[in-house]
Amino acid sequence: AQSVTQPDIHITVSEGASLELRCNYSYGATPYLFWYVQSPGQGLQLLLKYFSGDTLVQGIKGFEAEFKRSQSSFNLRKPSVHWSDAAEYFCAVGPLTGGGNKLTFGTGTQLKVEL
Amino acid sequence: EPEVTQTPSHQVTQMGQEVILRCVPISNHLYFYWYRQILGQKVEFLVSFYNNEISEKSEIFDDQFSVERPDGSNFTLKIRSTKLEDSAMYFCASSADRTNTEAFFGQGTRLTVV
């Protein structure tokens, strides 16, 4: 069965510092990979996704993520964090073929930004 | 920009009562989903719906749950007899087609069972 692990439950960074959120997945085949962000009281907003091709993908709000097949990882990065980035971040995987969008989510990483 | 709309944003219901959560997916989308997030836990898949039938459901989606697309625009989740443990944020999502493209999520309905 597929699973997603986000080992960091909470992360605190200073505004302007770089950020890396970790995500490891277990999947029987090559999956689709996603990062979503959830601000307090809000829904889930897609930051970026990886389907195939270039393993470094760019997303919205200055985020990027790198797919590393050998490590089964899809870590999210941002070079300089803004206070407005404080939110919860979810990594998710979905099936590569057919079946629509049944996503398996990780437990999330809560990001706090110190001014 | 098209968006998925969910109503109500917050619903409080007594244990044992039926609730219907409503969603208006993006108009040209064909796949529809419900997910839930119990407070402090991860988002969990409940059910996917395509071509007017359930295409996949999780073990959470038992006989107490049902989904319907009653009029071509709305997509509903019904819980027949709510339990305390049904308290959660319920997210509706839709995607454009059968291939795995982006799922757009609604803002969620927070269901509180008392």
Image: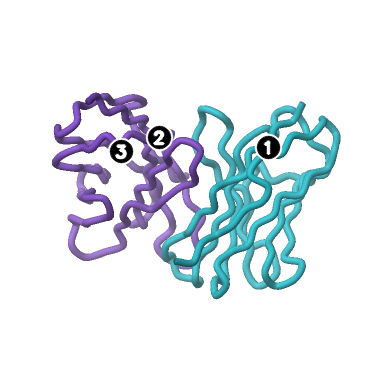
- Residue flagged by tag 2: what amino acid is it? Gly
Label 1 near label 2: C-beta < 8 Å? Answer: no
Q: How far apart are marks 2 and 3 (CA)?
A: 18 Å
**Disc 3 and disc 1 on one polypeptide chain:** no
Discs 3/1, front: 3
Q: Which of A56 and A77 is in front in this view?
A: A77
The purple one among the chains is A
- For mark 2, what is the residue? A108
- Residue flagged by tag 3: what amino acid is it? Ser
- For mark 3, what is the residue? A84
Chain of the residue where label 3 is placed in the rendered structure: A
Q: Position of residue A4 (x, y in %)?
A: 39, 40
Q: How far apart are marks 3 and 1 (CA)?
A: 27 Å
Q: Is residue B64 left or right of residue B33?
A: right
Chain of the residue where label 2 is placed in the rendered structure: A
State the SS at label 3: helix
Q: Distance between the residues labelled 2 and 1?
A: 21 Å
Considering only vertical position in the picture, is B2 above or below B12? below
- For mark 1, what is the residue? B111
Q: Which of B111 and B45 is in front in this view?
A: B111
